[in-house]
Image: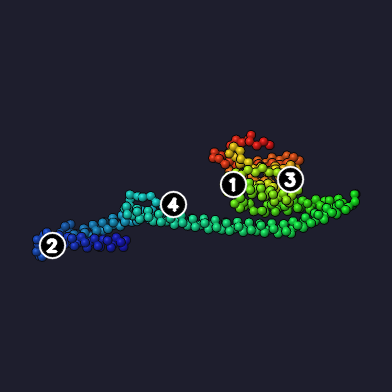
Amino acid sequence: MKAIIGRTLLLTLMFSALVAFFFYVFMDLSYAQYSKLLLETEAADMPFLAWLFSTIFVTSLVIASWISLNSRTRENFIIKKLEDLYSKQEFIKSNKMKKQTNRSIEQLYEVLEAQRSSLRRITDERVETQDKIIQERIVQERQRLARELHDSVSQQLFAASMLLSALVEQQEDDSPIEKPLLQVEKMVQQAQLEMRALLLHLRPAALHNKTLAQGLEELLQELQEKVTFDIRHRLEDIELSKGAEDHLFRIAQETLSNTLRHAKATEVEILLIERAGLVILRVQDNGVGFKQDDGKGGSYGLQNVQERAIEIGGSCKIVSVPSQGTIVEVKLPIEKGGLVDDSSIVGR
């Protein structure tokens, strides 16, 4: 309202000056004639001067209101554009605004978009850095726990197992404590297997610039020194992404850990080959196995294996027969076009 009143007064003053200038320049009248014209001439029972001033004021008020309304409309339109710039993060040029205004808002949008991109990048880098630090600390802690368990509990279990074996050998047949000693010996041996499986699980999944085949070779050599069953393997060098290699290595760890804990196997075979655009990782044992419907097929370890296979776009198949063993097979396509019909590639 203040803006309208101010514009009205300013326009009234300007129009009055223009009218006075017109009368002075274009009408050759004396002062007396001016006075008579302005004061004595009446239109609609009103002196000409009052009528003229009223007309100028009303015209100024109309023009001032129109200017204010037009300015308010443009201002609201620009505010809406700026709100869209903030909320919707978009800017579309409009013919209702001047080219200069369009260009100014577009430059503001470009600056804001650049700042958003910079902030997103900084945030992502910070999160990645934090994740990397956390993962490094987790790996260090796992290694520390593995060393301490190996140097303390594992060695004590080994010593207890050797002592129990010596005591069992010294007992006479049908001795009353022979059977309890044998049971304790089996319990200690099972605890040793559990400990070895735990140490295997705690082993970091990082390949440290090795290929998947090299990492598995090193893992199996290390494992063979700690277990009594026979490990056979066939490993081919296959070019895979870093994520796929890490997941397949972790799948092999998880499967071998389950074999140590539950299979009671005497032979384990590891296969890593490429056939018809598929990477095939297979772990097979001749252990006790389990029925597919007894709940073990959905155990946490095997469920982990299946989830990891899905994460890298592969498939996982688990086949187990009681008293005959278990096969865990993961197939991962390395060519575009998804999974291939591979039912005849690797026989059971």
Which part of the image, by quadrant, shows the N terminus? bottom left
- Name the spot of residue 56 as percent of width and height, x first: 21, 59
Q: Nearer the viewer, mark 3 or mark 4?
A: 3
How many angstroms separate mark 1 from mark 3 (CA)?
A: 28 Å
Marks 3 and 4, how far apart at CA: 64 Å
Observer-side mark, 4 or 2, equals: 4
Which quarter of the figure has residue 87?
A: bottom left
Q: Which residue is mark 4?
A: 88
Q: Which residue is mark 3?
A: 230
Q: Which quadrant would residue 309 be assigned to in this image?
A: top right
Dot 2 falls on a residue whose secondary structure is: helix
- The answer to whether 204 appears left or right of 335 in the picture is right
The numbered mark, 2 or 3, whose residue comes first in the sequence reads: 2
For residue 26, above or below residue 292: below
Camera-side mark, 1 or 2: 1
Identify residue type, mark 1.
Ala
The numbered mark, 3 or 4, whose residue comes first in the sequence reads 4
CB under 8 Å between discs 4 and 2: no
Q: Quarter holding the C terminus? A: top right
Dots 1, 3 in contact, CB < 8 A: no
User: Percent position (x, y) of residue 69?
Assistant: 31, 55
| Image-based side of 235 in relation to 44, left or right | right
Which residue occupies 63% across, 43% down?
A: 236
Q: Amino acid at mark 3?
A: Asp
Q: Earlier in the sequence, mark 1 or mark 4?
A: 4
For residue 244, the mark is 1
* Number of other residues with Cα within 10 Å of mark 1, as a class: few under 14, some 14 to 19, many 20 or more: many
Question: Which residue lies under the disc numbered 2?
Answer: 24
